Image (tube, grey):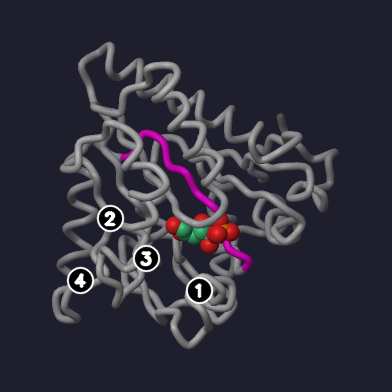
Amino acid sequence: MTTPYFVFESPEAASRKVASEIATLIRERSAQGRSAVLGLATGNTPLPLYRELIRLHREEGLSFRNVISFNLDEYIGLERDHPESYWSFMHHNLFNHVDIHPENIHLPSGTVAADEISDHCAAYDAAIQQAGGVDCQILGIGRTGHIGFNEPGTPATARTLLVHLDEITRQDAAPAFGGIENVPTTAITMGCGTILEARKIALLAWGAKKAGIVCEAIQGPVSEQVSASFLQNHPNAAFFLDQEAASEMNMDTNNN
Ligand code: F6R
């Protein structure tokens, strides 16, 4: 099996497409008096998507008042207001610029006590269930093939959990932290099992650096070594790529 993928001329063009699908979901739910539950990612990849969602809010009246959000992950050891925490990232790049209710924003805690982590993870999964499950999950992909922080070896069934970050993942984060020695070694992430329960999944990837792992995830074997390959078994998942990220794909196999 392969996961469907769509290739766009630029990250901005791909992001406009995904943002318009999210806007349709939010508006349809709003018209029904219901919430829209979004699963959100951090990192460089979703930045053009968040810029477009902010534009839709400012210029086209898209309201986030009925949105409930659950982020994928958070570093252990960072206070919310640490500049590299995912809490800070999301507020800086999206939440502070739209009308989402603060009480509808959910991220795992980076400062939960060690002996409370497993209860915290179970409560995070329970909160997602209680919100009705994720309607649309946004993902990036790490060079290790991770989704969330599900590094190689994490099983497809994992629920939200504490993970050790791969050395490659920590190297990729090092510039933002001013050196690898400052990058946390652990994080809490939605597990693959939690992620795969989303009704719809959009994985975004840009640039030549991601081309090899994108190709493996879409066309390679489904394997714990590349957690993004689990999307091949999801009924409504797709990759949104720019031309560089799609450059190693065998185009004959695109099933769209
Ligand atoms: C972020 C996350 C990660 C990133 C991935 C790609 O919340 O869970 O899986 O999506 O590491 O990061 P960027 O987008 O910075 O290349």
Residue receiving disc 2: 107
Disc 1 to disc 2, how far (Cα)?
24 Å
Q: Which residues are magenta?
A: 134-143
Q: Amino acid at mark 3?
A: Pro
Q: Residue at x 76, y 35 (%)?
A: 9
Residue 75: x and y, percent?
A: 35, 70
Q: State whether residue 242 is above or below residue 177.
A: above
Residue receiving disc 3: 83
Sooner in the amino-acid sequence: mark 4 or mark 1:
4
Looking at the image, the residue that sits furthest to the bottom is 181
| Nearer to us: label 4 or label 2 | 2
Q: Amino acid at mark 4?
A: Ser
Residue receiving disc 4: 118
Crowd tier of the residue under label 2, counting other residues whose Cα lies within 10 Å: few below 14, some 14–19, many 20 or above: many
Residue 180: x and y, percent?
A: 52, 83
Q: Amino acid at mark 1?
A: Gly
Q: Secondary structure at mark 3?
A: loop
For the C terminus, which image quadrant?
A: top right
Q: Which mark is residue 153?
A: 1
Residues under numbered marks 4 and 2 in contact, where contact means CB atoms less than 8 Å apart: no
Residue 225: x and y, percent?
A: 58, 70
In this rendering, position of residue 206 left or right of residue 162: right
